[in-house]
């Protein structure tokens, strides 16, 4: 990864325990170019409860932006040489080429916060906050602000800070997702490659996480048989489907549509026996 010697770098990360409370924290490390006579800054924030890892990662970016606003108000003269700020996250989906892109956020806002597939977007409140805070930062400082992806090895200090954050009191539910129903995974595999699935495919699943998204439910499940055994599957559906896919119960399903990042279901078939 090439380093710009004239930019402020804000490295951010989040950590979460997969416990019943989903306890998490975020870490922010700010480093300055040689032309700025300020020491590096390290901060931990937490502990948060009831969120998910993407919400925590978004919160880390927001905290970094707010720290820069505060720094600029106190050290405007020292920061005069700066014209560029680069945020580094190890979550590719949150880079400026993806979900945090300001032009994409504005388009989603015009489309009533739906994706091109007509799926309601998650974490709208935090995407709105990132967009407004970034606009405020640019307006006040006239800096160019970028959010870039970097591998975990480039944000090790922020990772350590986030783990400190999740152990901090007091507990906060400020970014919790209301209405989430959380269970325990039986496998730990990554998410399935949806391009390998097809309408009509059948397999057994066991739901472990159900999240309300506008008037739909995003249901995360483990695939329990076949060539995708142990992988994660994300299903979108209505409240009737949510009521059929109980956490901890194994059901056989048939796929209706396969999209880039989720599926819909044509039928929920018979119950499947859980392993002894």
Image (cartoon, helix red, strand yellow):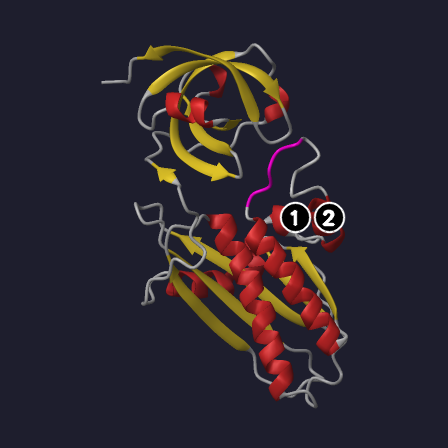
Relative to residue 43, is residue 208 depicted above or below?
above
The residue that disc 1 covers is 99
Q: Which residues are magenta?
A: 118-122
Category of crowding for the residue at label 2, using alpha-carbon neighbours closer than 10 angstroms: few (below 14), some (14–19), many (at least 20)? some
- The quadrant the C terminus occupies is top left
Location of residue 129 in the rendering, given as x and y in whole percent from the top left corner: 60, 60
Q: Residue furthest left?
A: 276
Mark in front: 2 vs 1: 2
The residue that disc 2 covers is 104
Relative to residue 148, is residue 36 depicted above or below?
below
Left or right of 196: which side holds 143? right
Location of residue 125 in the rendering, given as x and y in whole percent from the top left corner: 56, 53
- Helix or strand or loop: what does disc 1 sit on? loop
- The quadrant the N terminus occupies is bottom right
Q: Main secondary structure of the magenta part?
A: loop
Pick whichever of labels 2 and 1 is earlier in the sequence. Answer: 1
Relative to residue 125, is residue 257 depicted above or below?
above
- Helix or strand or loop: what does disc 2 sit on? helix
Q: How far apart, in angstroms, are the residues tagged by discs 2 and 1? A: 7 Å
Location of residue 154 in the rendering, given as x and y in whole percent from the top left corner: 58, 60
Q: Residue furthest bottom?
A: 77
The residue located at (44%, 21%) in the rendering is: 229
Q: Is residue 120 magenta?
A: yes
Location of residue 245 in the rendering, given as x and y in whole percent from the top left corner: 39, 23
Residue 177 visible in rendering? yes
């Amino acid at each position: 990864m090439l380093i710009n010697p004239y930019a402020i770098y804000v490295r951010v990360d989040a950590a979460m325990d997969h416990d019943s409370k989903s306890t998490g924290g975020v870490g922010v490390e700010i480093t300055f170019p040689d032309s700025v006579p300020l020491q590096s800054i390290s901060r931990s924030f937490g502990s948060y409860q009831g969120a998910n890892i993407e919400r925590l990662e978004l919160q880390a970016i927001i905290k970094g932006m707010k720290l820069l606003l505060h720094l600029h108000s106190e050290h405007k003269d020292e920061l005069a040489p700066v014209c560029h700020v680069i945020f580094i996250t190890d979550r590719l989906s949150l880079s400026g080429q993806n979900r945090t892109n300001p032009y994409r956020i504005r388009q989603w806002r015009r489309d009533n916060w739906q994706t091109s597939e007509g799926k309601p977007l998650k974490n709208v409140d935090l995407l709105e906050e990132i967009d407004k805070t970034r606009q405020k930062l640019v307006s006040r400082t006239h800096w160019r602000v970028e959010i870039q992806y970097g591998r975990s090895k480039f944000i090790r200090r922020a990772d350590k800070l986030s783990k400190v954050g999740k152990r901090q009191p007091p507990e906060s539910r400020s970014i919790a997702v209301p209405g989430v129903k959380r269970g325990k995974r039986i496998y730990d595999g990554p998410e399935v490659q949806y391009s390998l699935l097809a309408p009509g495919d059948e397999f057994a699943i066991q739901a472990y996480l159900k999240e309300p998204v506008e008037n739909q439910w995003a249901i995360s499940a483990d695939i329990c048989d076949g060539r995708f055994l142990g992988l994660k599957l994300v299903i979108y559906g209505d409240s009737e489907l949510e009521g059929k896919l109980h956490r901890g119960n194994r059901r056989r399903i048939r796929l209706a549509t396969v999209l880039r990042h989720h599926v819909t279901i044509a039928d929920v078939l018979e119950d499947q026996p859980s392993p002894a």
